[in-house]
Image (tube, rainbow, N blue to C red):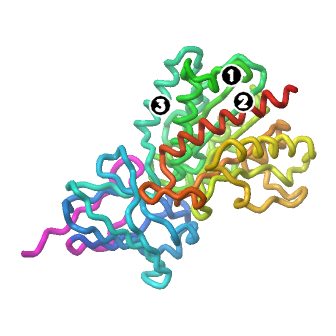
């Protein structure tokens, strides 16, 4: 007896896939580009009608994706309950179908979700913001409005003089960044957590959990509703195409910035690392050392963090000031940095079941905040 075809759909928050063909439990798929953009990498879709059958999902045309180097050694994320996200056995064949990732998985139940990384929905974002805003001593600010009419949410807390900005998900497909934010806000709003208490004593902390809610909901990898890469807008943000950056940068101008961490994910590098602001016009060794000192503290504290792998440093005077970390370091003389987490796994501490996971994102957030406490207190000596 011929078994019915599986059904694939993505008409939900952050969903993104194109079905080319379906034959039983085998499908050929492609990843649509971000709206008004050439970027294509993020996928998130649901398969139903496959309980007990091996799914064979061929995602094709990946040589034309934004980061082809992200596919070798990558296993797709999968969940049947949308709570626990594991990894499905996946293999990449550069020669087949203009670059094809083949995902194999046998669901126990009749429904399975697949994604490039564990999604962080706008509903979960709204819950996160509401819960944090209701915590004692937390001030909610609506910094601005996106092109689709969503809020740019900011949570502020703490009584100290040091101005700290933590912001994430300029690139919406880098959903690990908001899992990190969930972990950070849990630390910062827990009255029993001494790391959060210490930071609130030392600092005024401004947290933007999602800089790009439109792109997040639309299922984009890297852009907002107008197809704009927000992390190339920081030199001259505009209300017309990058209102999110304009709103955040204006708020930074009001408060000033002493320490800033912009949280991201990297498609190809299987490691956690920091990128700094080398090459800004006003670079001084003293300002640079402030970032390197933080990096050394985090490296000592956290086995998941390392310094051997990362991005090349910009040559003197050659930093791109349209990138957030460079602009913030130049504009405010701040200790600014970009935190990168992997889509794949941490090659130094691999986890075959989950790879890099939401749980590890949240644990890393606490380590980053604890390192900030040490950075602040050791700098006072």
Q: In this view, does 24 lie to the left or right of 115?
A: left
Which is more N-terminal, label 3 or label 2? 3
Q: Residue 198 carries which label?
A: 1
Front-most of 129 and 232? 129
Assign the magenta stretch its main secondary structure.
loop
Q: Is mark 1 on a helix, strand or loop?
A: helix
Q: Which mark is residue 128?
A: 3
> Where does the image place residue 3, in percent across and percent down from the top left?
13, 71
Residue carrying label 2: 373
> Where does the image place residue 161, in percent across and percent down from the top left?
78, 21
> Where does the image place residue 329, in percent across and percent down from the top left?
81, 42
What is the quadrant of the N terminus in the image? bottom left
- Position above or below: 20 against 145: below
* First to last magenta residue range: 1-24
Q: Is mark 2 on a helix, strand or loop?
A: helix
* Inter-mark Cα distance, 1 to 3: 22 Å
Q: What element carries label 3?
A: helix
């Amino acid at each position: 007896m011929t078994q019915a075809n599986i059904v694939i759909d993505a008409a939900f928050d952050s969903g993104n896939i194109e079905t080319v063909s379906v034959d039983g439990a085998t499908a050929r798929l492609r990843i649509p580009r971000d709206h008004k953009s050439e970027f294509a990498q993020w996928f998130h879709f649901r398969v139903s009608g496959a309980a007990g059958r091996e799914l064979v999902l061929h995602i094709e045309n990946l040589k034309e994706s934004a980061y082809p180097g992200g596919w070798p050694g990558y296993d797709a994320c999968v969940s049947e309950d949308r709570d626990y996200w594991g990894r499905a056995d996946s293999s990449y064949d550069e020669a087949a179908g203009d670059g094809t990732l083949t995902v194999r998985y046998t669901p126990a139940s009749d429904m399975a979700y697949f994604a490039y990384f564990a999604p962080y929905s706008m509903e979960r974002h709204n819950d996160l913001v509401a819960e944090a805003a209701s915590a004692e001593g937390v001030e909610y600010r609506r910094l601005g409005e996106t092109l689709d009419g969503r809020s740019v949410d900011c949570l502020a807390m703490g009584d100290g003089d040091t101005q700290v900005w933590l912001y994430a998900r300029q690139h919406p497909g880098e959903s690990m960044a908001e899992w990190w934010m969930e972990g950070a806000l849990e630390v910062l709003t827990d009255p029993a957590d001494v790391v959060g208490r210490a930071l609130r004593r030392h600092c005024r902390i401004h947290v933007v959990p999602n800089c790009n809610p439109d792109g997040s909901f639309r299922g984009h990898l890297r852009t907002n509703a107008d197809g704009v890469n927000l992390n190339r807008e920081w030199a001259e943000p505009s209300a017309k195409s990058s209102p999110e950056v304009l709103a955040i940068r204006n708020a930074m101008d009001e408060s000033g910035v002493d320490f800033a961490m912009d949280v991201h994910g990297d498609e190809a590098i299987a490691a956690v690392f920091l990128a700094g602001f080398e090459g800004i016009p006003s670079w001084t060794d003293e300002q640079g050392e402030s970032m390197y000192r933080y990096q050394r503290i985090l490296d000592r504290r956290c086995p998941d963090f390392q310094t051997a792998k990362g991005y090349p440093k910009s040559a003197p005077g050659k930093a791109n000031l349209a990138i957030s970390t460079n602009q913030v370091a130049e504009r405010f003389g701040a200790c600014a940095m970009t935190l990168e987490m992997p889509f794949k796994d941490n090659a130094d501490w691999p986890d075959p079941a989950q790879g890099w996971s939401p749980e590890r994102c949240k644990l890393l957030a606490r380590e980053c905040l604890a390192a900030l406490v040490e950075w602040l207190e050791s700098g006072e000596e």
